[in-house]
Amino acid sequence: MYLPFIFLYAIGVVTRKSLTELAYFGLLFLMVILTMRPKRGVFKKLGFLLGFEGLLFIMALFNPGQPLLETPIGPITHEGIYSFFMLLGKAFLSAGTAVVVTSSVGFSRLLAEMEALRFPRILTLTLAFTYRYLDLFTDEAARMKRALDSRAFGVGKREYYRKLGSLIGEVFVRAYLRNGRIYRAMLARGFGEFPSLEEPRPNAKTTMLALLALGGLLV
């Protein structure tokens, strides 16, 4: 099963206290990539994830400590650089491993494992519906963004972002209303619950990865 491995790996990563300890999980992450052989599109997602998390933790560079480089907003310190790479490494390795595994085996496989592990049914259904209609939500948001751009030509930045904020709120309102229509349509068609997914069986690959993650957690 892949879900126990993701859980053990994430716990192991977030409990590390040094970059040396984190390096073991970095090597394990490379092993996951070589084992799963993800598609090229997954590496684009990982690149975006790394850039987003880098911006998210960039203020850690300015933590109090021994100054290394002066900048207009304050000195970058030795302790700040260490903290930055610790935060970035933990966040990227945890999220990146989940992205690689999910993209390689499919989200439905993870849902089947959740059922096999007796996760609450309401949680499994919520995740299944979210995954099912995520593309629809994205397409709706993209259409509304194009409509805004075509009607806001020549508008100042301040007014544009004000309209963009209203658009984001409208997207969520439409999603809520569509959710009610979908639910009523499913009830009209006799929906009770999803059919049980095929129970996944453990294999040598997932067992090995889980044991390696557990070993790193115990060290």
Image: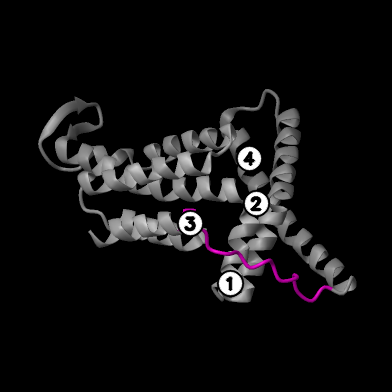
Earlier in the chain: of badge 2 and badge 3, it is 2
Which quadrant would the C terminus be assigned to in this image?
A: bottom left
> Is disc 4 in contact with disc 3, using a CB cutoff of under 8 Å?
no
Q: Which residue is mark 3?
A: 204
Magenta stretch: give its range: 191-206
Helix, strand or loop under label 3: helix
- Disc 4 marks which amino acid? Leu
Q: Real-space Cα distance between discs 3 and 1? A: 18 Å
Earlier in the chain: of badge 3 and badge 1, it is 1
Q: Which residue is mark 2?
A: 169
Q: Is residue 131 magenta?
A: no
How many numbered circles are shown?
Answer: 4
Residue at 41%, 55% (x, y): give it. 208
Residue at 25%, 54% (x, y): give it. 16
Disc on res. 179: none
Residue 128: image quadrant is bottom right
Q: Real-space Cα distance between discs 4 and 1? A: 43 Å
Earlier in the chain: of badge 4 and badge 1, it is 1
